[in-house]
Image (cartoon, rainbow, N blue to C red):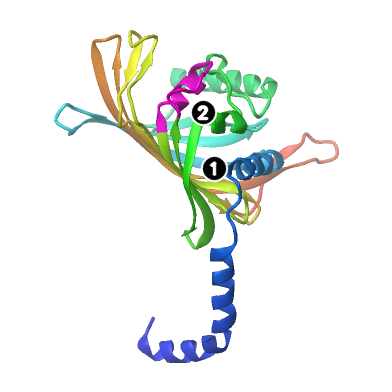
């Protein structure tokens, strides 16, 4: 901002300063909500938005990098996909690999894969995972496995957020892969205070995690994941990007270190328009 604009702006804001200061102090001094109740509200808000999600699609681009023993990138692959929701589950259809559109057998294979997952999503309740062998975990159960600490209020991307750290309890009795993994995690979560939506998550393995007693795979301590969401079109929160780095040893022999970065963009809202004497069609609305 040019200096000649600063003084008039300050003069205009001066009468509002006491009210702005009072609002800031009130927000800072208001008691923090209990985290279990907060997460229940987040869960309920998400259930209310599941149907709205069905009306959105967006694009995602991924960069997958393999890292060698010296910490250098040894291989890079890219993928682009169209993301959509079915019965509360996010699905993706790959449209490009390494910059080239899918064609021929690859396209047929991807079409069949997506059709399979759409059918599975239609039959799976929104609050359950699509993978049968992953088990399931509710918000309340997650909080039983985790120790929550250092609750606080911060401004995140210009909006008040409730922030807390969490760490898996090693003494927690767990059942299923998801619960077992949860015990090995630590991280921080940012909840948008007004909308009761997850705005950002940082999570990392604080200890090695053995799959099949370590014979099948061993996920190394320090593997991490970061996830972002933002409000879209003033009515829904959708992913904006994520980044993960995982080090894993498979079958006690081969070690992998992979870094995946995803960017989500080009959100589109659509609706089904019925026409007399014709089949219904999807109509894409103006971009948010």
152 up-or-down from 165: above or below: below
Q: Residue at x 44, y 30 (%)?
A: 168
Magenta span of residues: 169-185
Dot in front, 2 or 1: 2
Q: Residue at x 80, y 36 (%)?
A: 278
Magenta residue check for 186: no
Q: Earlier in the sequence, mark 2 or mark 1?
A: 1
Left or right of 269, for residue 258: left
Q: Which mark identifies residue 58?
A: 1
Q: Estimate the spatial distance between the alpha carbons at disc 2 and disc 1, rounded to whole Å.
A: 33 Å
Q: Which mark identifies residue 198?
A: none
Residue 231 position within the rendered picture, expressed as x and y whole percent measured from the top left: 57, 53
Residue at the far left in the pictured view: 70
263 up-or-down from 216: above or below: below
132 up-or-down from 53: above or below: above
The image quadrant that residue 188 belongs to is top left
Magenta residue check for 172: yes
Residue 253 position within the rendered picture, expressed as x and y whole percent measured from the top left: 23, 10
User: Which of the pair 263/195 is nearer the observer?
Assistant: 195
Q: Residue at x 59, y 18 (%)?
A: 116
Residue 118 position within the rendered picture, expressed as x and y whole percent measured from the top left: 62, 24
Left or right of 81, for residue 217: left
The residue beneath circle 2 is: 145
Left or right of 171, for residue 98: left
Residue at the far right in the pictured view: 276
Decide: few, some or many residues near mark 2? Use Cα within 10 Å; few <14, some 14-19, many ≥20: many
User: Which of the pair 227/287 is nearer the observer?
Assistant: 227
Does residue 229 show up?
no
Residue 138 position within the rendered picture, expressed as x and y whole percent measured from the top left: 61, 29
Decide: few, some or many residues near mark 1? Use Cα within 10 Å; few <14, some 14-19, many ≥20: some
């Amino acid at each position: 901002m040019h200096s000649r604009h600063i003084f008039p702006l300050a003069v205009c804001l001066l009468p509002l300063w006491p009210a702005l200061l009072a609002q800031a102090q009130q927000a800072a001094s208001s008691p923090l909500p209990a985290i279990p109740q907060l997460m229940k509200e987040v869960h309920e808000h998400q259930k209310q938005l599941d149907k709205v999600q069905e009306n959105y699609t967006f694009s995602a681009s991924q960069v997958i990098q393999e890292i060698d023993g010296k910490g250098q990138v040894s291989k890079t692959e890219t993928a682009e996909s169209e993301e959509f929701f079915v019965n509360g589950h996010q699905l993706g259809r790959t449209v490009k690999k390494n910059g080239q559109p899918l064609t021929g057998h690859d396209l047929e294979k991807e079409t069949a894969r997506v059709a399979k997952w759409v059918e599975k999503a239609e039959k799976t309740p929104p609050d359950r995972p699509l993978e049968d062998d992953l088990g399931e975990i509710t918000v309340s159960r997650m909080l039983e496995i985790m120790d929550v600490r250092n609750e606080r209020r911060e401004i995140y991307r210009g909006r008040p957020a409730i922030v807390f750290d969490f760490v898996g309890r090693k003494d927690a009795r767990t059942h299923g892969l998801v619960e077992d993994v949860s015990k090995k995690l630590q991280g921080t979560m940012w909840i948008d205070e007004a909308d009761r939506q997850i705005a950002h998550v940082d999570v990392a393995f604080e200890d090695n995690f053995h799959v099949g007693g370590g014979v099948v795979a061993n996920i190394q301590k320090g593997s991490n994941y970061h996830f972002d969401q933002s409000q879209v079109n003033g009515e829904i929160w959708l992913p904006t990007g994520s980044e993960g780095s995982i080090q894993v040893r498979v079958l006690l022999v081969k070690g992998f270190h992979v870094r995946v970065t995803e960017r989500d963009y080009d959100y589109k809202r659509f609706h089904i328009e019925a026409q007399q004497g014709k089949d219904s069609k999807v109509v894409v609305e103006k971009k948010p």
